[in-house]
Amino acid sequence: MRLPRFEYYAPETLEAALSLLEDRGEGAFVMAGGTDMMVKMSHGRLKPKTIISLKSIPGMDMISFDPANGMMIGATTRLADILTDLRIETHYPALIQAVQTMANVEVRNMATLAGNICNAAPSADSAPPLMVMNAEVSLASVRGERRLPLSDFFRGPGLTLMQAGEIMTSIHLPAPQVGRGASYMRISARCGVDIAAVGVGVEVRVQSGVFSEARIVLGAVAPVPLRASGSEASLIGKPLNDETLELVSDMAAHESKPISDVRASADYRKRMVAVLTRRAITQAYERSTARHS
Amino acid sequence: MKHNIKIVVNGDEYSLAVDPWRTLNEALREDLNLTGTKLGCGTGDCGACTVIVDGRAVSSCLTLAVSVDGKSVTTVEGLAPSGDELHPIQEAFIKTGAIQCGFCTSGMEIAALHLLSNNPSPTELEIRKGLSGHLCRCTGYNQIVEAISVAGEKMKKCCHEEERS
Amino acid sequence: MKEYSIIGKDVPRTDAEAKARGSALYTDDIRLPGMLHGRILRSPIAHGIIRSIDTSKASRLPGVKCVITSDDTPKIKYGNWRLFPETQDEYPLAVDKVRFIGDEVAAVAAIDRDTAEEALELIEVEYEELPGTFDVESSRAEGAPVIHDYCPSNVSVNRKIKYGDIEKGFSESDYIREDTFSFQAISHAYLEPCASLAQVDLDGRITLWTSTQTPYIVQCLLASTLGMRENDIRIIKPYVGGGFGGKMELRPWEFCAALMAKKTGRPVKFTLGREEEFLAGRRRHPMKIHSRVGFKKDGTLVAKDLRIQLDGGAYNAMGPTATFLCGNFGAMLYRYPNYRFLGEHVYTNKPPASAMRGFGAPQSLYASEVQMNIAAEELGIDPVDIRLKNAQVSGDQIPDVATISSCGFSESIRAVAEMSGWYEKRKSLKPGQGIGIGCYSFISGGVFNWFNTQYPFSAAEVRVFSDGTAHLLTMASDIGQGSDTVLKQILAEELGLRMEDIRMTSADTAMTPQGDLGTWGSRVTLMAGNAVIDAARKIKEQLFGAISARFNLNVIHHVECKNGRVQATARPDYGMSFGEAVAMVQKANRGEPLFARGSYTPRGKGLVTPAFGFGAQIAEVEVDRETGLVKVKNMWTAHDCGTVINPRSVEGQLAGSIQMGLGYALSEQMVMDGGRTVNVDFADYKMPTAMDMPPSEVVHVDTYEPEGPMGAKETGEGLASPTAPAISEAVYHATGFRCKDLPITPEKILKAI
């Protein structure tokens, strides 16, 4: 119940935020929407000495898009604003599929995509679709800025490649391309609001009726969102049919390394990886062909 | 160190000195004595603490009071125009039987206000989606869904009449 | 049916506006000058001896005003079954031993909640951990750890019911069905966490505002545990955010608030957190049910042998009643000419289970209903038809236990089959779709006086005034179900007044008449309603006498209260306004105010209840055969609650029951790791949301309960039972998977199909 004792700053520039973070060192945490941090703090799992809110930095909540360079989503962009962005709905529907299942209206009015990524929960809904769409994240520190593929970002539950003193400033998605389609499918015990028991993101490229590229990422079945490379490889060169789907989905189940917990057993999770992989590939395929026309 | 913040709650401006770890829920309930906003779980899962901050419905239990400095907050106490009148959402909740124990009610009404401001004619499914972060153990939700639909109709009519006059 | 002016109408709840405005005060909303905040230290281990407790560091923390352990208390045990003191097994704070994770060990009161919380971390407790036992089999095994010294077997209560000749019954059966069922614990999950606020006056008397269903029980048990007199304790029930059975006992924080208020001279408030509620809170009993049922070829029931073991957790709580009622419900719904029941309440090192909406019926009836469905299939009879063949009717008896008075059970079954299109759908649904039926019966309040109250079961005082108004005082407790509105409706109807003419004071033990056993077992409408009518009729006698004298009426005239007037029925002009009539009586009595007391205590009504509600429900589901996810598409309900006093309220209760039944069937469970409750927040305790609720249609079967106020009896609680078996049968119809251990999870379905 009791929140830890911390200092709170809401700097108005990124530079100020970065130097504060550098200055306070260990014990300083960056807050965007705060929804995950507040729960962790109230359960005693996070005890910051300093909280640096990014919400007063102007422009950091922007979403920008251009057909050549793709999409940029700022670190303090709220999930609710992603959901109502027609450009995202048109070009990145798999991201919408993930965001609309995240938490509830109130939390989506506060929480951010960057926060969901930095929290690095194995069940984070946003990670699989972003990873299959080749998302990158921008990290800034007083030493400068770097950009990383999201697929390299996660290191374990709550662990990422972010270094001390770094702040995630934005998330980037490459420009939409003809012939590609992505999908995110997830399952949980309750249809309203729930933490995913399994989530599967798929992006495919279809050329001449066969899959020419594929990325498959499995959520909540390993310590980090898991790239199913074997399944991806086995999809290449094949057409969409029951045989392909069975082969690839079985392989995805095989590649997953779920645990049993309060949300589902490992067995069930493996089975659902197969079901959702099949469904997500099918939908991604449909989207890739829809984009042709 | 306490932070001096100014917030406008239901149209009234307040100056408060708050610890950084004080939640908006605590500030409203304990500092401002606005106890209509409830605390049901403290983890953003039940919706009982919902208030509107600058036009967005948020969980007051997950919001630091200090982060609301300079912002405008609407709570259940801000819905009714006076002691004699009720907001159409409140009227509809009363009339349809959407209120039993009442502990989820203020959060539900605020969620309804947020929903209807963004979508004046929601479908039943949209209402249910809008409420999916709000738990109720008494009503089974159906009369609440009905209330929001009734309130939406009424609010559209009111706006319509205002526009006409 | 009699024409009423207020009964049977959709009267808005009298508390709705205050709740809609956010001005209704719940316990945690109340703050008093100088108030301290309390927190409880709970046991981190499931079973152990307390070697020592050192509170000195906590006491020295600035802002801490009081720290108590059991050594600061009179160490008097309590429990709701006062009639049998040996069942009273709980101390407000653990004495020498802890028995579950969450058992209350010490308490702190400080100037704010954070300081109190911080102080908890400074209390040093040394435990000697003992082996624990976490299910009924291990608790009953040879050499199992003994949880309470007084009870070496760990079986704290057993209950037997027997009638007919069970062996003969089975020997005459053509078909015998034997199954074992198991049930998970679920949480009441009321939205308002428990809260209590105590204040002590200059004479040392205590006022306690508390979120309770049973002010009278709290008053008595708080007095006995503090070694005080009952009349020195005043319990006030503010608005309560739901209870469902989880707030009907004395709770340690009520005791601690009162004791610490005495010790500090300042008001003390405790408000529980949700995590605490889930970790240590009361819950519905996990059970093992073994049931053997015998039928004739044509589907006629011949015999039932029922054995139930309740996993009671560390203390009895309301477990004895649940044990008792399981046996009663096992014999309900259908005519079992030969019946035997053995129920055992078993201690384990888990948080205590207690009363929860349905009180043994959801488990007991699930077993009955699933077995009816299996039997129907194996005997080649439609599930609806086999029920109609065996359905109880008015006048049926459970020997020495209960006699059924009004009963609209068969009508309910027929109505629900009709409205759902049962026979057609049973044949025509596609694979993956299914339809199933479940039925229930429930009590309208309990008869067996386990609390050993010395007062009437319910009481009411009615005061009337010359301005045409009335004041109703009753200790009955509205915890959200709407009983204040219903009692006002009953009084308004009796006195011919409007709702707005009635002021009401309820659930304040110092101001409202003794006594009332509280809100549980669906007792309030029938029992408190009868008390209100009793008081109202005494008032009417006086008013009628005055009218008779004033207009020199022939003694055979009928006089009535109607539309705000008191008048001769045949000659309404021989009458006057209600207020004038009151003034006249008051004058005749030389200024004495006109008031009356009424009461109700069931007598000669067997051991269980004065009246049973009945009903039947049908669920239609769709099962995703790949994921095992179940979507409930539709629910149809037909039920018999006697006269419907407030249709909107009844329908709201019904929908709320479906929500709870849906969760029980499909998603809710307290996941345990040994003695630890694992899912302690709403993210992982999966209660159905607005998105999960199916559309629902309802028919009220028209009956009249002679023992009930204006013919009414229970509603809303019994309905907690049929949803799970109806969904279970629908899932079977859709997939061929028959679930005998709730909940019906996707995993179980997939494993089976």
Image (tube, coloured by chain):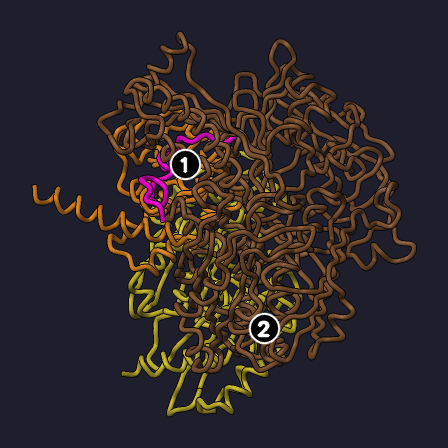
User: Is residue C753 visible to the viewer in this orientation of the structure?
Assistant: no
Which tag is nearer the camera, tag 2 or tag 1?
1
| Residue C8 drawn at (x, y percent) | 36, 45
Give the x, y percent position of residue C623: 50, 74
The answer to whether residue B143 is left or right of residue C73 is left
In the rendering, which numbered label is found on residue C490? 1
Q: Which chain is yellow?
A: A
Pointers 2 and 1 in contact (CB under 8 A)? no
Q: Are marks 2 and 1 on the same chain?
A: yes
Q: Nearer the viewer, residue C209 or A73?
A: C209
Name the residue furthest right: C143
- Is label 1 in a helix, a strand or a loop? helix
Bounds of the magenta span?
C1-27
Q: Is residue C205 left or right of residue A21?
A: right
Residue C191 shows up from this direction: yes
Near mark 1 (Cα within 10 A), the count class, few <14, some 14-19 or many ≥20, is many
Q: In the rendered picture, chain C carries what hue?
A: brown
Q: Which residue is mark 2?
A: C373
Tell me if mark 2 has few (under 14), some (14-19) or many (20+) residues whose alpha carbon lies within 10 angstroms of its own.
Answer: many
Q: Please give left or right for residue C127 compared with residue C10 in the image.
A: right
Location of residue B134 with respect to C209 vertically, above or below = below
Q: Earlier in the sequence, mark 2 or mark 1?
A: 2
Majority secondary structure of the magenta segment? loop
Chain B painted colour: orange
Q: In this view, which residue lies farthest toward the left?
A: B165
